[in-house]
Image: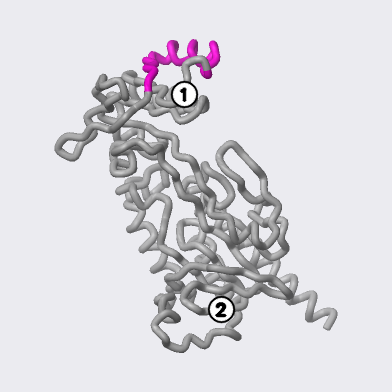
Amino acid sequence: MTEKNGNAGRTGKTVGYGNETHDVVVVGGGAAGLSAALVLGRARRRTLVVDAGEPRNAPSSHMQGYLSRDGMSPAEFLAAGREEIARYGVELVRDRVTDVTRDEDFTVVLDGGRAVRARRLVVATGLKDELPAVPGVAERFGRDVLHCPFCHGWEVRDEPFGVLASSAMSVHQALMVSQWSKDVTFFLHTVAEEELSDQDLRRLAAAGVDVVPGEVAEVLVEDDRLTGVRLADGSTHARSVLYVGPRPVPQTSLLERLGAEMNETPFGTYPVVDATGLTTVPGVWAAGNAIGFAEQVVHAASGGYRAAAAIVGDLLMTDLDAAVTG
């Protein structure tokens, strides 16, 4: 892998890659993109990975639940992945794709001025988490302000939890985290109590979750540790962990530009894909959080692998058919 700085085009240097053609361009260098690149490189397919360097799990110091990699830092995991794809001649460039057009193949334009041709695309651009606008939440996110108990629940087990409601669906989060602590307070925040159904209230009571109405005004911190929350009425509640529900913002503009069919969900709009990640645009696959909110690192890596394996077969049959008919 040759890692290049995509900003060369801004410095006035001549990039001169206009006629460059790859079998596959992978957009996104997270778990999904690197996994796809690894499989493609091992299949001897000329592959370029374009990575903007903005992984979703960057705020976390550790990732959990990935067999054999439990507790590894996300940065270390990605660094290992980049080293692995280097063994197979995959190129990675630090840049951002600004445009993709399609004729017989794809033309991929990078922010740094480079333009390359690709026979197939893997879009693994992920998503961004839009956090509730409560002072202190963004600063503590990934540390003691969390969103996924499967990712972090064990590490904070039995501590006093708070759950910040952002919609009526936050009830599910409050119920889920009660499996890791029996001291859970559900702060309704901007959700009115009447928005909760009788069944919601019964389940919360059965799980031992305390329900506190009122808007949360700020997160309280002492000695670089979360100590609680302050409500708009001035009352404070001691907590050492706060779960929040970020609004997922899928980074799917390239897919939309290519005309991929999209599906609206309660957690964002994602492309319609088949079992391998193939979108409704011929030659374009998607993987990782670009296809769904709940794709954990292990799922993303698996999705990238499946997409790459499908592409290898697709390119092979395309070339063989061309040889037969040509």
Q: Residue at x 51, y 53 (%)?
A: 126
Q: Quadrant of the image for the N terminus?
A: bottom left
Badge 1, how many Cα within 10 Å: few under 14, some, many 20+? some
Q: Secondary structure at mark 2?
A: strand
Residue at the extreme left: 223
Q: Position of residue 102 (x, y in %)?
A: 69, 71
For this view, does 61 lie left or right of residue 2?
left
Q: Position of residue 37 (x, y in %)?
A: 52, 66
Badge 2, how many Cα within 10 Å: few under 14, some, many 20+? many
In this rendering, is residue 188 above or below 270? Answer: above
Tag 2 residue? 115
Q: Residue at x 25, y 27 (%)?
A: 228
Tag 1 residue? 191
Q: Which residues are magenta?
A: 195-214
Q: Amino acid under label 1?
A: Val
In this rendering, is residue 42 above or below 181? Answer: below
Quarter of image, res 85: bottom left
Number of numbered tags placed on the structure image? 2
Contact (CB < 8 A) between labels 1 and 2?
no
Q: Does the stretch in magenta take in 278? A: no
Q: Secondary structure at mark 1?
A: loop
Q: Position of residue 159 (x, y in %)?
A: 27, 26
Q: Residue at x 64, y 57 (%)?
A: 256
CA–CA distance in space, label 1 to label 2? 48 Å
Q: Earlier in the sequence, mark 1 or mark 2?
A: 2
Q: Amino acid under label 2?
A: Ala
* Foreground label between 1 and 2: 1
Q: Quadrant of the image for the C terminus?
A: bottom right
